[in-house]
Image (cartoon, rainbow, N blue to C red):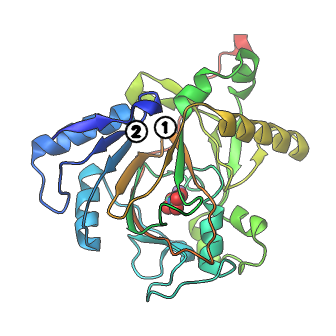
Amino acid sequence: MVFKSLEILHNLGAIIDDIDLSNTLSDKDILEIKDLFFNKHILVFKNQNLSEEEQLKFTENFGNLEIYPEFDKTNDSSKTYHVANVSQDGKHLTDNDEMSLYQKVNQRWHTDSSYRFTPSYASLLYGIEVLPDSAEGGETEFVNMFKVYENLEEPLKLKLESLHMVHYYEFGRRLFPELPPISTYEKKNVPPVSHPLIRLHPDRNNEKSLFFTANAGNQIGGMSQKEGEDLHKSLVDIVSKSPYRYKHRWQKGDLVMWDNKCLLHRAIPYDMNQYRRVFRRTTVAGLGAIKGPFLDPAKL
Ligand code: OGA
Ligand code: MN
């Protein structure tokens, strides 16, 4: 397997254009992909032609599939997520259709399933219908949260050390109150959770990254609502201005795999009434609770 690094990305991301993922891959190829993924966080596989089954099979190489109890993701299958402004039977939906509004929730910085006790590990998004080159927007943007953390001012790092953010699926309904309320089933299966704002990575020598999302809440435990929202807003600003971002312009047949543990991502807005955009997402479940820093009382 030969790959090209996306050099503009500060060591974030690699393009792989000589592998057909619909084939059964050798153990050696899988190991190479895993290794590259660990180091680059985003892999862009070009020119793929994948059925749902083939995409699921490739995804299973990286762990257990995430199952979706949420209604917006379970139109057909509970293992693939139809990311589109087009219905499953091919009808182009308007920008105020429920399905389109769910996509708009993705236009805020996030990692997938941050509102679960165990957020996702990796997401694999496959481009079925993409915007023409002439269209504005429609990219997916990523940011490296190790780099964001590393570049925070020291007093802010210290302030974040003991804090948690509250993540909840229902927050999307606050953003778009015209959506129907979440069901009792969803409330039961995806209750609010809290995660540390600084994430330790035990598989990387406890390296630290900043961990928050802007599509699943804006409240910080232990702070007043206003104080928490102000802090949250300042973190969104920092990420939006970070130089450690990569915007992926989609071509049909791209399969982009990203590491939700290390990155945030968001969809870039586009004219939903004019353009069709259809993706299929499969997701590898995370392995356990997110670990925060152990507090050193001397530092408080
Ligand atoms: C997702 C997502 C981004 C996009 O499917 O999880 O955030 O550009 N998609 O559609
Ligand atoms: Mn997402």
Say how many tags the image has.
Answer: 2
121 is higher (above) or lower (below) than 300? below
31 is higher (above) or lower (below) than 207? below
268 is higher (above) or lower (below) than 263? below
Q: Is label 2 in contact with label 1 (beta carbons under 8 Å)?
A: yes
Quadrant of image for the N terminus: top left
Horizontal side, residue 236 vs residue 118: left or right: right
Q: Amino acid at mark 2?
A: His
Disc 2 is placed on an element classified as loop
| Residue at 66 percent of width and 77 percent of height | 95
Horizontal side, residue 106 vs residue 87: left or right: right
Quarter of image, res 78 = bottom left
Residue 132: numbered disc: none
Q: Which residue is mark 2?
A: 41
Q: Amino acid at mark 1?
A: Cys
| Residue at 66 percent of width and 54 percent of height | 108
Q: Which residue is mark 1?
A: 262
22 is higher (above) or lower (below) than 294? below
